[in-house]
Image (tube, grey):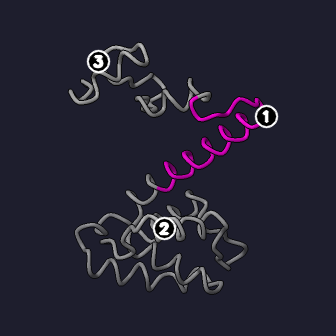
Amino acid sequence: MEIPLRLRDFQAQWGKSRFWTFPRSGVFHGPLTHELCYRPDKRNITNPAERERVLIRLVSVTGTAALFERAYILIFGSQIRALQTLNARLLQKQELVPFYVAAKSEYQNIYSNYAFDQWFNFMLSQTFIIMQGNTVGITNRGREFLKYLIQEAHSLNKAG
């Protein structure tokens, strides 16, 4: 993919070709990430301990955002509503069935081959919920996900 024309003069500053780089790891690497990774001196971070602290924070924040963005793409609105309810109180697993049933009746084409256990297990697989016996609760990750949706102004009223 070519770098947009207005940014091409930037390539001389960082010694790369006119193409964006997508390494085998699948992580996007462009001018901003290059500066953050290879030019910490431009950010006045010369102390190695401070640079390490900043980079660990950057990786943590970026990784969490990527995790939550992926989850948001995949999650159904009924699952978000279930998480919101779990944020207020513990529920028995059976008490989550109405969230699924309501979504299934409204979105029959989506749920025609999607069972309750699949719906429930998605939230488990994302570590948004935890189950002990028959009691279901929200995890810290689930709470952070809900806060992230609000912070990033994502709709809580998704389809499904």
Q: Amino acid at mark 2?
A: Gln
**Left or right of 55 in this view: 77:** left
- Under tag 3, what secondary structure? loop
**Left or right of 27 in this view: 46:** right
Q: Amino acid at mark 3?
A: Arg
**Most common SS among magenta residues:** helix
Q: Nearer the viewer, residue 111 or 53?
A: 53
The magenta-colored residue range is 42-68
- Residue bearing the label numbered 1: 49
- Residue bearing the label numbered 2: 151
Ranked by sequence position, the earlier of labels 1 and 2 is 1
- Under tag 2, what secondary structure? helix
| Residue 109 part of the magenta segment | no
Q: Amino acid at mark 1?
A: Ala
- The percent position of residue 104, horizontal first and vertical second, equals 32, 77
Outermost residue toward the right in this view: 49
Ranked by sequence position, the earlier of labels 3 and 1 is 3
- Under tag 1, what secondary structure? helix
**Left or right of 61 in this view: 50:** right
Ranked by sequence position, the earlier of labels 2 and 3 is 3
Quote the CA–CA distance across marks 2 and 3.
35 Å
Quarter of the image with the N terminus is top left
- Residue bearing the label numbered 3: 18
Label 1 near label 3: C-beta < 8 Å? no
Q: Residue at x 56, y 30 (%)?
A: 42
